[in-house]
Image (cartoon, helix red, strand yellow):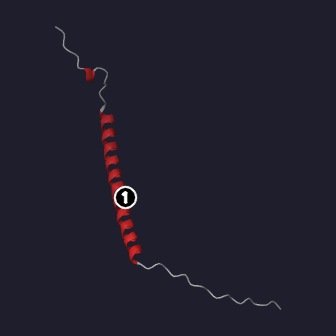
Amino acid sequence: MRKAIPVDNVFKPKPSQAELRVDATTRAAQAIISEEVNARDAKTERLRAARLALEATEEPPVQKISAKKKTRRKR
């Protein structure tokens, strides 16, 4: 009798040791980058919420009406 050939291993070449190391390095780098992105986004949201809370409690700035400046005559 013949052995049954597993369908998922028919045309799948095994990666070399170098490819395994590169893949591990890539996964580690992507994990670090995604952590940094998440931390940056969290900080941005926290700062935005603090700014909006501060702006909500502050009074709107009053615009000062400036007096006309006198121009100097040329002689």
Residue 61 vs residue 72: left or right? left
Residue at horizontal 30%, vertical 41%?
24
Quadrant in the picture for residue 47: bottom left
Percent coordinates x, y for residue 30 in the rendering: 34, 47
Residue 61 vs residue 11: left or right? right
Percent coordinates x, y for residue 67 in the rendering: 64, 88
Question: Is residue 46 placed above or below 6 in the rendered structure?
Answer: below
Residue at horizontal 23%, vertical 16%?
5
Residue at horizontal 39%, vertical 66%?
48
Q: How many other residues sit within 10 Å of disc 1, few (<14), some (14-19) or many (≥20)?
A: few
Q: How many marks?
A: 1
Quadrant the C terminus occupies: bottom right
Question: Is residue 42 placed above or below 8 in the rendered structure?
Answer: below
- The residue positioned farthest toward the right in the image shown: 75
Q: Nearer the viewer, residue 28 or 74?
A: 74
Q: Secondary structure at mark 1?
A: helix
Q: Nearer the viewer, residue 4 or 66?
A: 66
Q: Amino acid at mark 1?
A: Asp
Question: Is residue 5 placed above or below 68 in the rendered structure?
Answer: above
Residue at horizontal 23%, vertical 20%?
6
Q: Which residue is mark 1?
A: 41
Question: Is residue 43 placed above or below 34 in the rendered structure?
Answer: below
Percent coordinates x, y for residue 3 in the rendering: 18, 13
